[in-house]
Image (spheres, rainbow, N blue to C red):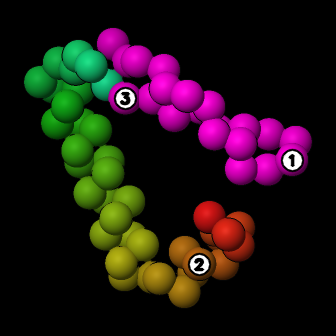
Amino acid sequence: MAEMLQPVRKFQAACLQPFRFVALGDDDHRKLRMALDSALDRSFLDPVSDQLKTPPGL
C-alpha cells in the first residue's frame, strides 16, 4: 500500500509524483531493499556514467 504525496514540478511539461510506502510485506521489503542497494552500488562504482544519465539540475 502506498500513499501519494504532493506532486513536484521539475520540468515545464511534466511533474513528478512522489509516494511513500505505508504497508509492505516482508518479502517485498527485502526485494525493494536489494534493488535499491544494487542501484546505489552501480552509481557508486561508476559515478561518471551515472552523471551523464542524470539531467542537470536534479
Query: Which is more N-terminal, label 3 or label 2?
Result: 3
| Residue situated furthest left in the rendering | 26
> To which residue does mark 1 refer?
12
User: Local crowd at mark 2 within 10 Å, few (<14), some, or many (≥20)?
Assistant: few
Query: Which is more N-terminal, label 3 or label 1?
Result: 1
User: Local crowd at mark 3 within 10 Å, few (<14), some, or many (≥20)?
Assistant: few
Location of residue 52 (image quadrant): bottom right
Which residues lie in the magenta part? Answer: 1-20
4 is higher (above) or lower (below) than 50 = above
Location of residue 17 (image quadrant): top right
**Image location of residue 43, percent across then percent down:** 42, 72
**Image location of residue 13, percent across then percent down:** 88, 42
Label 3: element kind: strand
Check if mark 2's residue and mark 3's residue have beta carbons within 8 Å: no
> How far is mark 2 from mark 3, CA to CA?
25 Å
28 is higher (above) or lower (below) than 23 = below
Q: Amino acid at mark 2?
A: Gln
Mark identifier at residue 25: none
What secondary structure predominates along the stretch shown in magenta?
strand
> To which residue does mark 2 refer?
51
Q: Amino acid at mark 1?
A: Gln
Residue at 62% of width from left, 64% of height from top? 58
**Image location of residue 5, percent across then percent down:** 49, 26
| Residue situated furthest bottom in the rendering | 48
Using the image as rendered, state which of residue 48 and residue 14 is in the foreground.
14
Using the image as rendered, state which of residue 1 and residue 49 is in the foreground.
1
> How far is mark 1 from mark 2, CA to CA?
22 Å
User: Local crowd at mark 1 within 10 Å, few (<14), some, or many (≥20)?
Assistant: few
Using the image as rendered, state which of residue 54 and residue 46 is in the foreground.
54
Label 1: element kind: loop
